Image (spheres, rainbow, N blue to C red):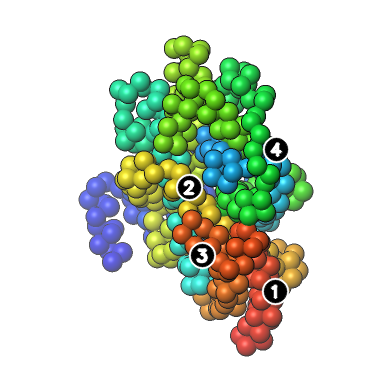
Amino acid sequence: MFLDEKEDVEKEGGTWQPVTAIASLPSNTSPLYTDRWTRKLLSYGVESRGIQPVPVEERTDTQFSKIFFLWFSWNVNILTFSAGTLGPAIFGLGLRDSCLTILFFNIICCAPPAYLATWGPKLGMRQMVISRYSFGYYGIIIPCILNLVNMCGFSILNCILGGQALASAGNGNLSWTVGIVVIAIISLLVSFCGYEVLNWYEKVSWVPVLITFIIALGVGGKHLSNPPLVEPATAAGVLGFAGTLAGFAITFSSLSSDFTTYYRPDVSGWRIFGYSFAGLLLPIVTLQCLGAAVVIAAPSIPAWEQGYAGGNIGGLLEAIVRPTGGFGKFLAVLLSLSVAGNIAATFYSISLNIQIFIPPLVVVPRYVFSLVATAIVIPISIVGAHRFYDTIINFLGLIGYWASAFIAIIILEHLVIRHNNPAEYDLDDWDAPRRLPSGIAALAAGIASFGLVIPCMSQVWFTGPIAKTTGDIGFEVAFGVSAVLYLPFRLLEIRILGHV
């Protein structure tokens, strides 16, 4: 096979190099022979490295504040705003109850992804690669599939919202479909280039978006001061909204360390945690509360109500800034582009997770899978564009369950089994199935937890017997039951296998 490759490359005037020679290439090169195309991309700074661990000597990035801007830009967008609208619009909560729920549950749900981001500099591994040390080489494929569904789902929701906002700015001259395609292509360009370009983009892209939201608040804020009275909040309403919020924030945990693997390993964990926690919490709480306030006021303002028809968040935002005239159209375009930072970072992690899902693809450069992600997201976004609220409720309500179980398992593995000590991870085992755990303990704990999670679920299509009384407590139960089951299962697994 290698002789055939050598002949093909030399015919094209390239230089063939076997896997063992790749060390002489730039540090982010995938272990695959390279041709002129790949070398050209690398010379432009495109990151090729996929899920291969970053050696200690290559973890040299000291610009630790970049992780703050990445999380901040990721969440300063109209999807975050739209998540806040669900409290009043779907769960019947008033402004005070919506905002208190948003604040309290996001403080809880932003902590796990912020903590897991601290593992990247210490281990130099992507989040799902680290998770192989709990779920095993093959067992991690199941959480990886769920994570891919999660990330594709969020990208689809963002494309829909961005397309709606862009179409609203076009006064009917631009369809939602065209808007969706434009947003996805912009996101592809950023994610294709990889770590350096992505971090640069996230460092600057939040500025015009934040200014736009401030202008929107200045223009429409006078309508938000006297929210109408509503019925007292019910436990079911609060917990249902909380479960949706958990599905929004806690799922960042499955990709947290993807963006910190190049940082110096001697950086303080508290520093990375602080940057990450602030970068997540500040935009999420602020914009979700703004979303709740705006959607409560919308029925009393004809222009807002018309723009919001059919759950069109982009149309609602465009209606808010419409009094500024032509400048409002420009602001609506900026709001539509706000989702690109979220989608680009998500596409980046999708490109890594595909290599976990199908391990032989580790030899394919990472950027190829950004193209794959785009090809998946665009058509589904177009099909689902006119059912946004149904989509977001069903999606966010479900993904919080598996993510909670996943977080409990990998955190217990790290803190209890490996004693919070990076040295207890043999980095040479990352792609060695026989030297990794079998994954049976992790999968058994996660799957068994759903025996209690299902009765505690409250969804549009199903309400469990416990949830009928308590409201949706599925994500809390998933975390607790998985944690209780995992330790005895894992200790038994270690005893049988004879190694950690």
Amino acid under label 2?
Answer: Ile
Helix, strand or loop under label 2? helix
Residue beneath the point at 45% across and 37% down: 311
Residue in front for this viewpoint, 462 or 395: 462
Crowding at dot 3, Cα within 10 Å, few <14 / some 14-19 / many 20+, comes out as many
What label does residue 484 carry, if any? 1
Helix, strand or loop under label 1? helix
Mark 1 or mark 2: which comes first in sequence?
Answer: 2
Q: Which of marks 1 and 3 is in front?
A: 1
Q: Name the residue under label 2.
A: 392
Crowding at dot 2, Cα within 10 Å, few <14 / some 14-19 / many 20+, comes out as many
Residue beneath the point at 39% across and 44% down: 387
Residue beneath the point at 49% across and 35% down: 339
**Residues under numbered marks 4 and 1 in contact, where contact means CB atoms less than 8 Å apart:** no
Residue in front for this viewpoint, 10 or 287: 287
Q: Name the residue under label 3.
A: 143
Q: Nearer the viewer, mark 3 or mark 4?
A: 4
Mark 3 or mark 2: which comes first in sequence?
Answer: 3
As drawn, which residue projects farthest toward the left?
11
Amino acid under label 1?
Answer: Val
How many callouts does the rendering have?
Answer: 4
Q: Mark 4 points at which residue?
A: 96
Residue beneath the point at 36% across and 45% down: 384
Mark 1 or mark 3: which comes first in sequence?
Answer: 3
- Residue 391 drawn above or below residue 406: above
